[in-house]
Image (cartoon, rainbow, N blue to C red):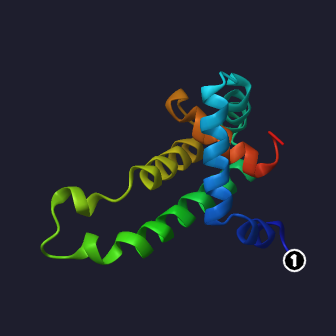
Amino acid sequence: MSAYVELQEFITYRRVDEAHRRAILAQERGQQNFADTGFRAAMSRDDRMLKVLELAANVLDHEQEAQYGQTMRSRTATPGEQVGTTEAQMWREAYRLCDKGSPIRNFEWIYGAAAWLCGYNA
């Protein structure tokens, strides 16, 4: 079994939600090292980090589709209903910037959460 398949089975909505909660808790406690670890991995374009960011963004997109899909595609949907969740958009953008090689500090806590999913902040 390849590492990709193992990661794909490991990155679930529940795990992404747990990583997000840990990032919020670390931020509230002022534990900047949580975010810094993720940002360093993002800056180095770590392969595992990229894969986790991509998979987590896909998981959030899938969850968004399950919860809001029909509403988002409805002809009567307002522009706000068509956009999607902020969380899914932020993870997708964090992945895009990391893949491009230009991560930004604005997403450091998302990178920290992804690093935790990678096992860096265990």
Instruction: Name the quadrant of the C terminus.
Output: top right
Task: Give the residue at x 69% y 27%.
Answer: 36
The residue that disc 1 covers is 1
Residue 79 placement (x, y as % from top left)? 17, 58
Residue 81 shown left or right of residue 113 in the figure: left
Q: In this view, does 92 lie above or below 81?
A: above
Residue 53 placement (x, y as % from top left)? 62, 53
Instruction: Name the quadrant of the N terminus.
Output: bottom right
Residue 85 shown left or right of residue 29 in the figure: left
Task: Give the residue at x 53% y 36%.
Answer: 107
Task: Give the residue at x 52% y 62%.
Answer: 60
Q: In this view, does 48 lie above or below 3?
A: above
**Residue 46 seen by the camera:** no
Q: In this view, does 40 lie above or below 96?
A: above
Q: What element carries label 1?
A: loop
Residue 16 placement (x, y as % from top left)? 63, 56
Give the camera-side residue of 34 and 21.
Answer: 21
- Tell me the kind of residue under disc 1: Met
Which class describes the residues within 10 Å of circle 1: few (<14), some (14-19), or many (20+)? Answer: few
